[in-house]
Image (cartoon, grey):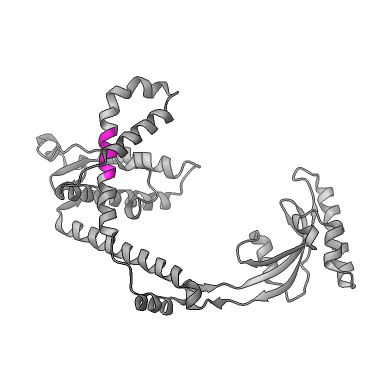
């Protein structure tokens, strides 16, 4: 789902909170409350469970820097509140979940966990909760889809968008380069790397003395481009490894780099040409401009709708 759902796992954000605003103990102990959204109270324990699940979903690769984690905590808190407001509004509007879609989702979940003994043992106990979560998500998605269903922009608006945002329709500078690669196994001893580097340095001297780069690439290069004389064509910035990109950008036209060590071995690059940045004609990018403008208008419409929900609701977040 777009907007506030981006980047956070479904399981993390679809907890169905139970309203307990009328509970004396809960209301008295404000220190245990995470948020109050109209008549719904969300405890700090509930928030922490969702937050930790979201962290595991997004940062499964390892430890998260403290500053980034705090920023993510605030994002999750905002998303929980916004999701509840959207869900409440969907109920007020009388939207109904797509039960066929929900059943398909349950079947898919069953299939995904067919060999999971924990799911098999707990299925009957938690199935109703799973269905409720899916229905909740479906209602939220339906409301967002209906709000984003706006009219397509007129042609004059699209052309003005093109004129106002030239950077979105400008092809960046490209550089045409060729390469010779002396392959070296990653596990090779340092002396093998040094020998390959000396070989590449020797080829550089031969080319600077007048021999043809393409001919030597066809004979010595272990790169896939060897058959075409090492020609990689015109490349946008960022295609090459950062260390290589930096070296190539420093080259003058027809200049050779020094030998550069990369993962596959030792390389020698030559800069063959530079194609400057170019603003594409409107006729070439009209459809793309229309698509970009439409998405921006949809995003703006959705954000305005969320702001109206926030302004009309009674929301208190205790942090």
Q: Residue at x 70, y 70 (%)?
A: 176
The part of the chain drawn in magenta is: 131-138
Q: Is residue 84 positioned above or below 296 on the image?
A: above
Residue 265 image point, x, y percent: 77, 52
Q: Quadrant of residue 301?
A: bottom left
In the visual, does 155 lie left or right of 185? Answer: left
Residue 135 magenta: yes
Q: Residue at x 23, y 51 (%)?
A: 86
In the visual, does 133 lie left or right of 290? Answer: left
Residue 279 magenta: no
Q: Is residue 112 positioned above or below 304 on the image?
A: above
Residue 298 in view: yes
In the visual, does 151 lie left or right of 267? Answer: left
Total labels: the figure holds 0
Q: Quadrant of residue 43?
A: top left
Choose between 192 and 282: the one closer to the eye: 282
Choose between 30 and 189: the one closer to the eye: 189
Choose between 136 and 25: the one closer to the eye: 136
Q: Residue at x 56, y 77 (%)?
A: 278
Q: Main secondary structure of the magenta part?
A: helix
């Amino acid at each position: 789902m777009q907007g506030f759902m981006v980047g956070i796992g479904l399981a993390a954000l679809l907890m169905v909170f139970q309203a307990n605003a009328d509970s004396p103990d809960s209301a008295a102990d404000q220190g245990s409350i995470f948020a109050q959204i109209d008549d719904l109270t969300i405890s700090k324990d509930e928030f922490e469970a969702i937050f930790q699940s979201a962290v595991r979903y997004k940062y499964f690769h390892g430890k998260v820097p403290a500053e980034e984690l705090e920023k993510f905590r605030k994002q999750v808190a905002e998303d929980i509140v916004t999701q509840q407001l959207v869900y409440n509004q969907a109920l007020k509007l009388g939207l109904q979940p797509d039960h066929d879609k929900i059943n398909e989702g349950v079947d898919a979940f069953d299939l995904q966990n067919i060999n999971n003994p924990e799911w098999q043992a707990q299925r009957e106990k938690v199935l109703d909760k799973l269905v409720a979560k899916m229905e909740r998500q479906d209602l939220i998605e339906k409301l967002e889809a209906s709000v984003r269903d706006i009219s397509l922009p007129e042609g004059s608006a699209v052309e003005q968008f093109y004129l106002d945002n030239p950077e979105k329709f400008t092809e960046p500078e490209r550089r045409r380069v060729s390469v010779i690669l002396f392959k070296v196994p990653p596990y090779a001893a340092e002396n093998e790397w040094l020998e390959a580097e000396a070989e590449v340095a020797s080829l550089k001297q031969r080319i600077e003395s007048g021999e043809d780069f393409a001919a030597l690439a066809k004979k010595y290069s272990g790169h896939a481009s060897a058959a075409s004389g090492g020609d990689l064509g015109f490349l946008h910035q960022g295609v090459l490894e950062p260390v290589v990109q930096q070296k190539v950008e420093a080259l003058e036209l027809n200049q050779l780099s020094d030998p550069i060590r990369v993962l596959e071995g030792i390389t020698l690059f030559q800069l063959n040409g530079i194609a400057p940045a170019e603003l594409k004609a409107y006729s070439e990018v009209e459809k793309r401009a229309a698509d970009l403008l439409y998405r921006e208008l949809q995003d703006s419409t959705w954000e305005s709708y969320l702001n109206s929900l926030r302004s009309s609701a009674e929301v208190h977040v205790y942090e």
